[in-house]
Image: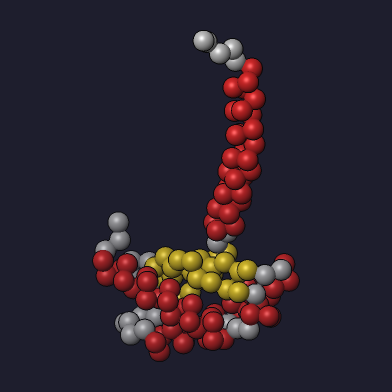
């Protein structure tokens, strides 16, 4: 379990990276980019930023391209906003856990719709004791 300090640094970086991305990139061009989580190394020299991009396929591709090409600029903005001895080197990774979670919820909802109908049919077939 990460230390309390490391957790606070992660949350601070998550918030500031999200703000920098929101200010720097236009939603129509890059889609809606959100920072889901930040995993910081113990020495704070590197950070893995888990992002999700909402939009069409072109926006997703453009958003990831913009993030990688503007990585140093985002690092600089975060470095000015967050006072740390070292500004972590950022690496962006697309996190599709939200999409997968939504798909699982959709499957569960579909199953819920079909199960009550089959339960009612089973109740009609079983003989009733009087």
- Considering every residue shown, the one lying at the far left of the view is 4
The percent position of residue 27, horizontal first and vertical second, equals 63, 80
- Considering every residue shown, the one lying at the far front of the view is 130
Q: Locate residue 39: give its quadrant.
A: bottom left
Residue 96 horizontal side relative to residue 81, left or right: right
Question: Compared to 125, does 116 lie above or below?
Answer: below
Question: Compared to 80, does 41 lie above or below?
Answer: above
**Which of 80/52 is in front?**
52
Instruction: Name the residue rendered at 61%, 49% in the picture.
Output: 106
The percent position of residue 49, horizontal first and vertical second, equals 49, 69
**Which of 102/81 is in front?**
102
Q: Locate residue 11: give its quadrant.
A: bottom left
Q: Locate residue 70: give its quadrant.
A: bottom right
The image quadrant where one finds the N terminus is bottom left
**Which of 94/103 is in front?**
103
Res. 88 in view:
no
Res. 31 in view:
yes
Residue 54 horizontal side relative to residue 8, left or right: right
Instruction: Name the residue rendered at 58%, 73% in the picture.
Output: 33
Instruction: Name the residue rendered at 39%, 87% in the picture.
Output: 81
């Amino acid at each position: 379990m990460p230390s309390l300090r490391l957790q606070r640094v992660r949350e601070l970086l998550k918030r500031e990276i999200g703000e920098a991305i929101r200010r720097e990139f236009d939603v129509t061009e890059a889609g809606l980019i959100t920072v889901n989580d930040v995993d910081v190394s113990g020495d704070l020299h590197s950070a893995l930023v888990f992002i999700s991009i909402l939009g069409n396929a072109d926006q997703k591709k453009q958003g990831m391209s913009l993030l990688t090409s503007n990585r140093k600029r985002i690092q600089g903005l975060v470095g000015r906003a967050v006072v740390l001895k070292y500004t972590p080197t950022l690496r962006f990774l697309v996190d599709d856990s939200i999409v997968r979670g939504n798909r699982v919820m959709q499957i569960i909802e579909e199953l819920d719709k079909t199960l009550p109908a089959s339960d009612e049919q089973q109740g009609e077939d079983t003989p009733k004791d009087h």
